Amino acid sequence: MTKSCFQKEILAQFPDALREKAKANSKIFEKIIPVILDHISAFGDARVFAEAGEYDYFFEDPTYSRESLLWKDENEPSVAAQKLQKVLALIDNIDEAFFVPETIKTAIWDYATEAGRGSVLWPMRYALSGRDKSPDPFTMASILGKKTTIHRINTAIKLLQE
């Protein structure tokens, strides 16, 4: 099956509203195909995941509570906000042309290891997807692009600072 035929088949599985968003954002749709492939064993699985909202966050800003941005037993929103501000600064230093998962991971990994991977990567992942389960934050950031990634992290920081 050609790439084009495969994409059309996946698109056909999407509910109407998501299909329209995917058509309007074809660059993002093309980038999420590998993510979809990792999670399905049959085309119908794409429909099930799409109907459950599993791909919505690629096409629209997620909504979530302030508490959902906090890692496990952490309960201090200001600390999570500080960690996201550091992530934001690290991401901001990446050239748009090199905004790919490996480069994003390289930029953030040492800080995440030092400050606690979960307490750094969880709020980043949640800010980008608004979900407990989603692709890793480096892949998501790359798919969304630098501008959207920065916007979503800023939104999370503001929510944590309320």
Image (cartoon, rainbow, N blue to C red):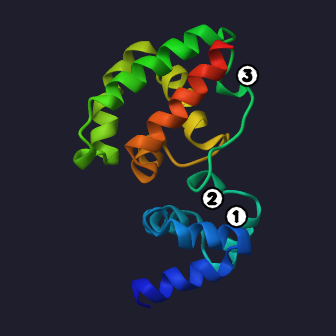
Q: Amino acid type of disc 1?
A: Phe
The residue carrying mark 3 is 67
How packed is label 3: few (under 14 Cα within 10 Å), some, or many (20 or more)? some
Q: Earlier in the sequence, mark 1 or mark 2?
A: 1
Taking the image as drawn, is residue 79 in sight? yes
Q: Amino acid type of disc 3?
A: Glu
Q: Residue 89 bears which disc, if any?
A: none
CA separation in Å, label 1 and label 3: 25 Å
**5 sits left or right of 10 in the view:** left
Residue 49 vertical placement versus 88 (above, below): below
**92 sits left or right of 18 in the view:** left
Residue 111 vertical placement versus 97 (above, below): above
Residue at 49% over, 44% down = 136
CA separation in Å, label 3 and label 2: 22 Å
The residue carrying mark 2 is 55
Taking the image as drawn, is residue 71 in sight? no
The residue carrying mark 1 is 49
Dot 1 and dot 2 residues touching (CB under 8 Å): yes
Q: Earlier in the sequence, mark 3 or mark 2?
A: 2
Residue furthest out toward the front: 24
Q: Amino acid type of disc 2?
A: Tyr
**Residue 147 lies in what quarter of the image?**
top left
**53 sits left or right of 42 in the view:** right
Q: For numbered disc 1, what is the local secondary structure?
A: helix
Q: Nearer the viewer, mark 1 or mark 2?
A: 2
Q: Nearer the viewer, mark 1 or mark 3?
A: 3
Q: For numbered disc 3, what is the local secondary structure?
A: helix
CA separation in Å, label 1 and label 2: 7 Å
Residue at 58% over, 34% down = 127
At which x and y percent is residue 54?
67, 57
At which x and y percent is residue 91?
35, 31
